[in-house]
Image: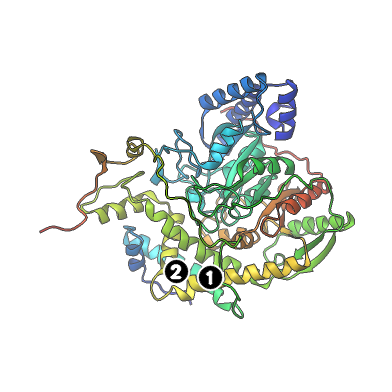
């Protein structure tokens, strides 16, 4: 086995036994990236020099008996909407071309404090707006399972890197499914934690009431270890949770005996590929055989969740992206007045999907339309929370597909924004409620493309979420690896 | 019937200097998306609570203490144009 194929847990064992060094693992990951990047374009920036320095530091620490935790010496990829001090951060937008942040995001600090080795910055849909990573101003990313297909999005670069082995772990952000959907489409594990548990300080904001940072990993245990390292109260984020945190590792391996799981009735039917529905139904049956009580539950508001999301998220985006004005940072066009300068800089700097969402959000918030659109969407959001609350009186966790389809072909949905938005239909409700949800691979379709299974839990329900996920992982026995050819770049 | 939008007004509010062709194309696309988004009006009944932080937070306060900010010169290095510690902009008001 090549070192780049190790999980965090496996690499950690070898690092602590002295069987291998952090520098050797990093070189293996860099070597892999040098072969895969020409086809995948998972990274926007690979920072070999700094990565080699931090791997050497991790090795020196191991030699001195200093152990900063499970991420020490592990090569990580970081989505390019997370600020990294001294390393270009663009959020895949022209408007931030050349922007070098003067500070680190809290999660980046936490990775560094934990001794992780940051390999580079990964590609995303511009400002995390998209479901295929095709909306990047720097070119699309592709799926390691079939390079004619997209890796999902918006954290498609992070997902492709972990899946292909050009990183051992990664961070992404999830506003409507942007960690879980790409994880599903590339055959890896991705989790969006409870809103407020991972600091958003230094995350370039898209929709602040929905955005959450989380891990993309090769295994459920890796995801739990990464989450433990990055979450926690942060005074720099006013929505940060200051209470007691659940233990994601506490119930791993306990199985599902005695748990009640709800199959969401609304997340099936029209638009769902038969292979996805069959794999999910098969897993539900296995969970029942393993001792869970599996029942069907109905959450009727899920049918209008997508509509509410496409008003709330653009509304918040239109406000958040007002900061890109060509004055304090980023792209600047010339203009005779300040307003002309701003309007021209923004028109030149933003791509079509970002422009579309700013216009949509501005319209939804504008006088005369506010109550019918934004106000009503907020009422739907409350109703979704109430639907979830009713369901969680009956069951411990909910299950569904992560995405209605497997990875789709590059270019297939770029001309029809609405068809692209529909890829997030299963993931959006958890963002609107602020609840944690996780995706993991359960099998392949006839074309050899991964199928994702989603588990949802109530706020701060991560212990149960990971307990169920670990059992699904065991029952699925998913060991397939992507078939990307190694082509020297 | 797609929803009709005064797209030039929305673009002005958004501070986006778009061409006539771009405006027309976004007007059509937004009509289709808003048509779908209007499904929020199908909500039956009223939720009992307003939307709030999922963990029930109302507000967050911190002690009003002095602490160091980011280094000014480092921040200004990212600005397209700066002078004497300030951002430079064209005139904000029209003059005679």
- Looking at the image, do the residues carrying marks 2 and 1 touch, with CB atoms under 8 Å apart? yes
Q: Residue at x 75, y 28 (%)?
A: A13
Q: Residue at x 41, y 74 (%)?
A: B4
Q: In which quarter of the image is the C terminus of chain A?
A: top right
**Callout 1 crowding tier (Cα within 10 Å): few <14, some 14–19, many ≥20:** many
Q: Quadrant of the N terminus of chain A?
A: top right
Q: Where is residue A380 in the image (x, y as percent from the top left)?
A: 58, 71
Mark 1 belongs to which subunit? A
Label 1 SS = helix
Q: Which residue is drawn at 61% across and 42% down?
A: A230
Label 2 SS = helix
**Could one spot residue A111 in this view of the protein?**
yes
Q: Residue at x 41, y 37 (%)?
A: A100
Q: Is residue A115 left or right of residue A277?
A: left
Q: Name the residue under label 2.
A: A364
Counting labels gives 2
Direction left: furthest residue: B96
Q: Is residue A87 left or right of residue A407?
A: left
**Rendering colour mode:** rainbow
Q: Is residue A477 left or right of residue B49?
A: right
Q: Name the residue under label 1.
A: A377
């Amino acid at each position: 086995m090549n070192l780049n194929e190790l999980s965090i847990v496996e690499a950690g064992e070898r690092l602590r036994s002295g069987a291998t060094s952090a520098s050797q693992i990093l070189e293996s990951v860099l070597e892999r990236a040098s072969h895969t990047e020409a086809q995948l374009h998972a990274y926007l920036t690979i920072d070999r020099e700094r990565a080699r320095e931090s791997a050497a530091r991790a090795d020196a620490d191991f030699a001195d008996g200093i152990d900063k935790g499970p991420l020490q010496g592990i090569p990580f990829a970081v989505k390019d909407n997370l600020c990294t001090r001294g390393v270009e951060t663009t959020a895949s937008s022209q408007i931030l071309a050349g922007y070098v942040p003067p500070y680190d995001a809290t999660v980046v600090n936490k990775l560094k404090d934990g001794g992780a080795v940051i390999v580079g910055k990964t590609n995303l849909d511009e400002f995390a707006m998209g479901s295929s990573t095709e909306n990047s101003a720097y070119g699309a990313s592709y799926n390691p399972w079939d390079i004619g297909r997209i890796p999902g999005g918006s954290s498609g670069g992070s997902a492709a890197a972990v899946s292909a082995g050009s990183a051992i772990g990664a961070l992404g952000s999830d506003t409507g499914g942007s960690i879980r959907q790409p994880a599903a489409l590339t055959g890896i594990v991705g989790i969006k934690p409870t809103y407020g548990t991972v600091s958003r300080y230094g995350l370039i904001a898209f929709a602040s009431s929905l955005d959450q940072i989380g891990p993309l990993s090769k295994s459920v245990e890796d995801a739990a270890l990464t989450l433990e390292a990055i979450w926690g109260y942060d005074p720099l984020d006013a929505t940060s949770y200051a209470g007691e945190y659940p233990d994601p590792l506490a119930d791993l391996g306990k199985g599902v005996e005695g748990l009640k799981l709800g199959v969401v009735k609304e997340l099936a039917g029209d638009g769902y590929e038969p292979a996805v529905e069959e794999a999910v139904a098969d897993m539900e049956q296995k969970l029942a055989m393993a001792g869970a009580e599996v029942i069907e539950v109905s959450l009727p508001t899920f049918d209008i969740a997508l509509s509410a999301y496409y008003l709330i998220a653009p509304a918040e985006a239109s406000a958040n992206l007002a900061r890109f004005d060509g004055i304090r940072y980023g792209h600047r066009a010339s203009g005779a007045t300040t307003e002309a300068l701003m309007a021209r800089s923004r028109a030149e700097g933003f791509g079509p999907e970002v422009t579309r969402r700013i216009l949509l959000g501005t319209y939804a918030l504008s006088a005369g339309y506010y109550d019918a659109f934004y106000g009503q969407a907020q009422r739907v959001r409350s109703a979704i929370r109430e639907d979830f609350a009713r369901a969680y009186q009956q069951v411990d966790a909910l299950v569904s597909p992560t995405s209605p389809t497997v990875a789709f072909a590059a270019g297939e949905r770029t001309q029809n924004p609405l068809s692209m938005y529909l890829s997030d239909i299963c993931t959006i409700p958890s963002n609107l409620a602020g609840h944690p949800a996780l995706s993991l691979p359960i099998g392949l379709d006839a074309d050899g493309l991964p199928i994702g299974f989603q588990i949802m839990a109530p706020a701060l329900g991560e212990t149960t979420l990971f307990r169920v996920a670990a059992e699904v992982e065991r029952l699925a026995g998913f060991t397939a690896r992507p078939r990307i050819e190694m082509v020297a770049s | 019937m797609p929803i009709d939008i005064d797209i030039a007004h929305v673009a002005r509010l958004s501070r986006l200097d778009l061409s006539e062709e771009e405006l027309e194309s976004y007007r059509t696309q937004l009509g289709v998306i808003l048509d779908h988004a209007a499904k929020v009006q199908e909500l039956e009944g009223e939720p009992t609570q307003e939307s709030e932080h999922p963990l029930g937070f109302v507000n967050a306060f911190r002690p009003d203490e002095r602490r160091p900010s980011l280094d000014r010169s480092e921040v200004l290095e990212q600005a397209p144009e700066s002078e004497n510690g300030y951002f430079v902009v064209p005139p904000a008001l029209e003059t005679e």
